[in-house]
């Protein structure tokens, strides 16, 4: 589980997505589960009521997720576009690199760990590649030590 006192780095987009999810969970999902519990109570004896047990379990899971999101948002450090230094790879930067190991060009958006989605080019600043790129400038060459071996990258451009 998330360390309740650990700072979480988020981009502005990441913050908005978590706030939207929290709002849906609190307003929509809580109401849906309350209705399920209310309906399940009409089925009779609660000690042998599978629908009631299932709805109560769903409620517990929902409340855990809400608590987790509230903790994340409480300790979040939001990297605003104005905080991103120009010309230096930082959280929120979009970095075009040439993979010198495999001779191909790749583009990564550097994000906080909670927002990472490597299959869509969003890598964490804590990942091997993200960490290697942090603080670099256009033209710099870096070695990223990944689980599958060292990959050499050249920074081609930095935007955002």
Image (spheres, grey):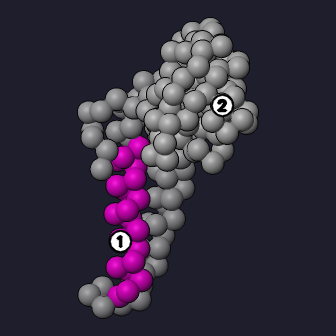
State the residue at coordinates (63%, 9%): 87
Q: Is residue 141 shown to the viewer in this render? A: yes
Marks 2 and 1: CB-CB under 8 Å?
Answer: no
Q: Is residue 22 shown to the viewer in this render? A: no
Furthest residue in direction top, as rendered: 86
Residue 67: x and y in percent read: 35, 47
Q: Is residue 52 above or below residue 27?
A: below
Q: Is residue 69 above or below residue 77?
A: below
Q: Is residue 58 above or below residue 21?
A: below
- Label 1 crowding class (10 Å Cα cut-off): few <14, some 14-19, many 20+? some
Q: Give the magenta part as a residue range.
A: 49-69
The secondary structure type at the circle numbered 2 is loop
Is-magenta flag for residue 18?
no
State the residue at coordinates (66%, 33%): 99
Residue identifier under label 2: 100
Residue identifier under label 1: 56
**Which one is nearer the viewer's eye here, 110 or 22?**
110
Q: CA distance from mark 2 to mark 1?
A: 54 Å
């Amino acid at each position: 589980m998330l360390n309740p006192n650990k700072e979480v780095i988020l981009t502005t987009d990441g913050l908005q997505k978590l706030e939207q999810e929290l709002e849906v969970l609190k307003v929509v999902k809580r109401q849906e589960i309350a209705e399920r519990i209310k309906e399940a109570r009409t089925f009779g004896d609660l000690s042998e009521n599978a629908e009631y047990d299932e709805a109560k379990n769903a409620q517990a899971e929902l409340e855990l997720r809400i608590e987790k999101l509230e903790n994340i948002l409480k300790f979040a450090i939001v990297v605003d576009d104005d905080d991103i230094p120009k010309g230096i790879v930082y959280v929120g930067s979009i970095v075009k690199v040439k993979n010198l190991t495999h001779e191909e060009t790749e583009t990564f958006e550097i994000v906080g760990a909670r927002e990472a989605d490597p299959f869509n080019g969003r890598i964490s600043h804590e990942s091997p590649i993200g960490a290697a790129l942090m603080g670099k400038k256009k033209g710099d060459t870096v070695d990223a030590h990944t689980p599958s071996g060292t990959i050499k990258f050249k920074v081609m451009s930095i935007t955002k």
